[in-house]
Image (cartoon, rainbow, N blue to C red):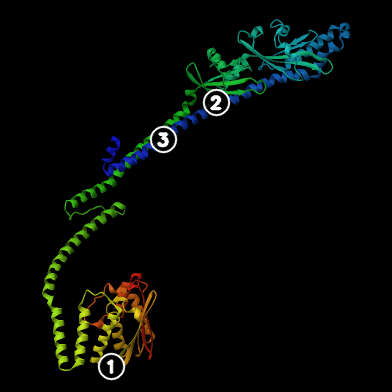
């Protein structure tokens, strides 16, 4: 609650800065958190991928070594000459007893030569061949190891049950060759029964290599982390020089329960990768301290993170600076508003530019100018009003005095028997009264007709030739209200321009057809040409635009004009009002007005 009150008390500029900084900091923190989480996974995946590549390469070397051992077994089993020698005692036992020792010696030499040929000096392996008749062949000395002791091993009993060319891999196995025990604690072997389709199993072949052969492979491709080879029961076969015995025991115990890629051993995290050897079914495992595995990649991500953080801080500083510079103009406007509130209307904003603040500043200045103008106009209006009120008091008597004088003259003329002159004075008095009376903006249509009767009477007294006024007016139009003096300008134009002050008639027609009130003023004058008619029609459309700059004088009835009638009727009844002029040379002119009557006027 206190935080909300503190935020509410801040100025608009500080609120905008707070919102901007908050909207930047929150996404930045979220981005850095997600980035840190994702980079950890990426670093871990990259380290695992690198370790797997090394593991794959080591696997290829081990696979090559084991294939060489199998190749030796296959050679022993498939070589025709060796098989003949191995099987001979079984097939011809009787003949051998009577044979010469020389033949047996030659056969032994052939076997020994073959064994020496299939084992290379730089890839030393020990070959043992045990025959069912108790005879054996080796490529090592009998003093090094008695091959008949192999029959006492637990795995030897399994050999006779193997089918076809299947082999059995034995490891770990204590070193049996006496000369190798000093440098090799263990050895690994592969064994296979020698079988014939007729005789069955006639012997056994065993190929053995020392532990250091495998250790050399594990050390050659991995110089910075531990690697170990385990059998199918997770027993240690060989390890490189980084692997200590306690770590091996801990690892073999853990592998029996899970195969996690990250494992904590003795309080330290290790990255564990496992690969199964397809030939033997054994496991090749690399064990790399997790911090060491990710150190190089993690250093790259940390540098990128640091650069991003620095860039963000610089951007935040720049944003705050620019926002303060922009929002300071709003602060200036606030200070100006306070001065105006205190009554100083002479101040003005100096903010410039094309942005919203500059527009607001310009509008503020224009508003102050307008306020000053309104104050000056109100002052001037009040002065003029006081002057007008005084003038009105002085002139109040003038209209009444004029009408009283005209009535007195009319009565004297009537007393002398000059009724025409009296009627003329009466018509003039009515026209003056309707002209001077400012209260009557709208009058009933029957009053408008009466005014025009008086107007025609006055015009006939002025002219040599009388004009006849005809009316065809329906009774329902009598009380429809119109602006005063609407027909007079049209009749005046008909007398002056249509009839050319000659004899003739003017016909006024009026009817109401819901909701349109139609008025037609027709004369039998000279008419107009098409050019004149077009000019008058164009004058109607331009009358509204011209009226704003027009100087309207009230010097006489005839000065109002058709455009004035059109303008007044349009202002009164809207754009739905329609005024048409039809004329032909020699046939007269007809002016039609179609007036939409509002709903409230239709029931009068």
Taking the spot 70% from the left edge, 12% from the top edge, the residue there is 155
Numbered mark located on residue 244 in the image: none
Return the disc, 1 or 2, that comes first in the chain's sequence: 2
Labelled disc at residue 466: 1
**Alpha-carbon distance for marks 3 and 2?**
32 Å
Residue at x 30%, y 76% (from the top left corner): 482
Residue 164 in which image quadrant: top right
Disc 3 secondary structure class:
helix
Label 1, residues with CA under 10 Å away: few <14, some 14-19, many ≥20 = some
Horizontally, residue 399 falls left or right of residue 179, namely: left
Say the numbered circle drawn on residue 30: 3
Tell me the mark number nearer the camera, choosing from 3 and 2: 3
Cβ atoms under marks 3 and 1 closer than 8 Å = no
Q: Position of residue 462 (x, y in %)?
A: 23, 91
Q: CA distance from mark 3 to mark 1?
A: 100 Å
Q: Quadrant of the C terminus?
A: bottom left
320 or 526: nearer the viewer? 526
Label 3 packing within 10 angstroms: few (<14), some (14-19), many (20+): few
**In front: mark 1 or mark 2?**
1
- Viewer-proximal residue among 493 and 232: 493
Query: Mark 1 touching mark 2, by CB under 8 A?
Result: no
* Relative side of 282 to 540, left or right: right
First in sequence: mark 3 vs mark 1: 3
Query: Label 2: how many residues lie within 10 Å, few (<14), some (14-19) or many (20+)?
Result: many
Q: Where is residue 552 drawn, in percent x and y?
A: 24, 76
Q: Is residue 488 above or below residue 371?
A: below
Mark 3 or mark 2: which comes first in sequence? Answer: 3
Foreground: disc 3 or disc 1: 1
Under circle 2, the secondary element is: helix
Is any part of residue 73 visible from this angle?
Answer: yes
What is the secondary structure assignment of the residue under circle 1? Answer: loop
Please name the residue that numbered disc 2 is placed on: 51
């Amino acid at each position: 609650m206190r935080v909300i009150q503190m935020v509410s008390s801040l100025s608009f500029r500080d609120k905008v800065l707070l919102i901007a900084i908050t909207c930047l900091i929150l996404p930045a923190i979220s981005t850095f958190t997600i980035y840190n989480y994702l980079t950890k996974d990426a670093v871990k995946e990259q380290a695992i991928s690198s370790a797997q590549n090394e593991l794959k390469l080591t696997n290829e070397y081990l696979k090559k070594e084991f294939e060489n051992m199998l190749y030796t077994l296959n050679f022993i089993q498939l070589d025709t000459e060796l098989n003949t020698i191995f099987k001979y005692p079984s097939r011809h036992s009787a003949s051998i007893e009577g044979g010469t020792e020389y033949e047996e010696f030659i056969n032994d030499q052939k076997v020994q030569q073959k064994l020496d040929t299939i084992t290379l000096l730089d890839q030393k392996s020990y070959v043992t061949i045990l025959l069912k008749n108790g005879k054996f062949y080796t490529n090592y000395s009998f003093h090094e190891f008695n091959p008949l002791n192999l029959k006492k091993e637990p795995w030897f009993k399994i050999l006779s049950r193997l089918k076809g060319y299947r082999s059995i891999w034995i490891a770990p196995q204590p070193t049996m060759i006496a000369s190798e025990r000093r440098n090799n604690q263990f050895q690994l072997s592969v064994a296979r029964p020698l079988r014939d389709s007729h005789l069955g199993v006639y012997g056994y072949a065993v190929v053995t290599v020392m532990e250091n052969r495998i250790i050399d492979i594990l050390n050659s491709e991995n110089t910075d982390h531990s690697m170990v080879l385990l059998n199918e029961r997770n027993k240690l076969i060989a390890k490189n020089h980084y692997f200590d015995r306690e770590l091996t025991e801990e690892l073999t115990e853990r592998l029996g329960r899970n195969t996690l890629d990250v494992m904590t051993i003795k309080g330290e995290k290790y990255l564990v990768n496992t690969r199964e050897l397809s030939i033997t079914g054994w496991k090749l495992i690399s064990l790399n301290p997790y911090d060491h595995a990710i150190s190089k990649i993690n250093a790259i991500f940390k540098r990128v993170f640091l650069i991003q953080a620095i860039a963000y801080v610089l951007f935040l500083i720049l944003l705050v600076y620019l926002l303060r510079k922009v929002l300071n103009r709003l602060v200036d406007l606030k200070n100006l508003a306070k001065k105006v509130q205190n009554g100083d209307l002479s101040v003005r904003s100096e903010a410039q530019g094309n942005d919203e603040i500059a527009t607001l500043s310009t509008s503020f200045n224009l508003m102050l100018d307008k306020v000053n103008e309104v104050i000056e106009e109100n002052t001037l209006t009040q002065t003029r009003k006081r002057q007008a009120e005084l003038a009105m008091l002085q002139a109040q008597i003038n209209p009444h005095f004029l009408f009283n004088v005209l009535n007195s003259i009319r009565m004297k003329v009537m007393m002398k028997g000059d009724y025409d002159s009296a009627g003329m004075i009466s018509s003039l008095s009515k026209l003056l009264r309707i002209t001077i009376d400012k209260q009557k903006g709208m009058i009933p249509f029957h009053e408008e007709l009466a005014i025009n009767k008086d107007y025609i009477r006055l015009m006939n007294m002025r002219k040599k030739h009388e004009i006849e006024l005809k009316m065809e007016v329906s009774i329902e139009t009598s009380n429809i209200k119109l602006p005063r003096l609407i027909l007079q300008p049209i009749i005046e134009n008909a007398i002056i321009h249509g009839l050319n002050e000659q004899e003739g008639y003017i016909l006024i027609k009026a009817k109401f057809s819901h909701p349109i009130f139609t008025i037609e003023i027709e004369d039998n004058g000279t008419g107009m040409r098409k050019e004149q008619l077009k000019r008058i029609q164009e004058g109607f459309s331009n009358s509204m635009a011209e009226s704003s700059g027009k100087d309207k004088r009230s010097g006489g009835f005839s000065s109002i004009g058709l455009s004035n009638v059109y303008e007044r009727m349009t202002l009164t009844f809207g754009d739905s009002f329609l005024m048409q002029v039809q004329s032909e040379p020699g046939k007269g002119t007809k002016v039609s007005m179609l007036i939409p009557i509002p709903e409230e006027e239709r029931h009068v």
